Image (spheres, grey):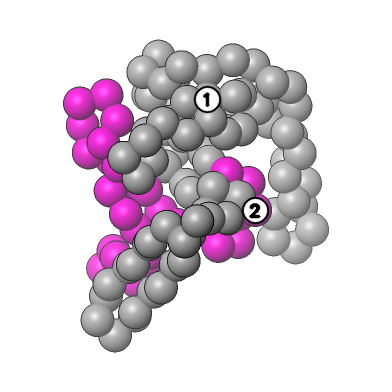
Amino acid sequence: MTSERVPQVFIPVAGRIWPATIDTGFNGALEIHEALRDEVPHRFAGEVVSLLAAGQRVSEDGYRVEFPFDGELVRVLATFSPDDEILIGTRLLRGYRLEVDFPARRVLLERTA
């Protein structure tokens, strides 16, 4: 968890450990930092429309990617972003239990299926 109390986990990608924010308000699977585009196998899948806070809609290019998560490669729909972080959405967490202990500043993410 960050000092601002944002739930985070760390993911090894392309020989580096990347912080990945768990965003329970993001119902997609994954948003990946643009710097990883050449490091992650991806294939264009089409336009993705996301609904943001206050009803704002955003259209982005979506990609089918193979991404390392929880010790295996997962195949999910993702977008690439110039932000220097990875966002994990609720679609990627469907088979997981998420526990955020704010006082202890601890994030527990465990597979249930």
Mark yes or no: residue 52 visible.
yes
Q: Residue 93: x, y in percent? A: 52, 54
Q: Quadrant of the N terminus?
A: bottom left
Q: Secondary structure at mark 2?
A: loop
Magenta residue span = 1-29
The answer to which quarter of the image holds residue 36 is: top left
Could you say whether the residue bearing mark 1 is in a helix, strand or loop? strand
Q: Residue at x 65, y 27 (%)?
A: 62
Few, some or many residues within 10 Å of mark 1 (<14, 14–19, 20+):
many
Query: Residue at left 75%, top 63%?
Result: 54
Find out whether residue 25 is within the magenta segment: yes
Q: Quadrant of residue 8?
A: bottom left
Question: Mark 2 belongs to which amino acid?
Answer: Asn
Q: Residue furthest front?
A: 113
The residue beneath circle 2 is: 27
- The answer to whether 5 appears left or right of 28 in the picture is left
Which quadrant of the figure has residue 67?
top left
- Residue type of the residue flagged with mark 1: Val
The residue shown at (37%, 24%) is: 35
Q: Which residue is mark 1?
A: 65
Q: Residue 73 location, x and y as percent?
A: 41, 31
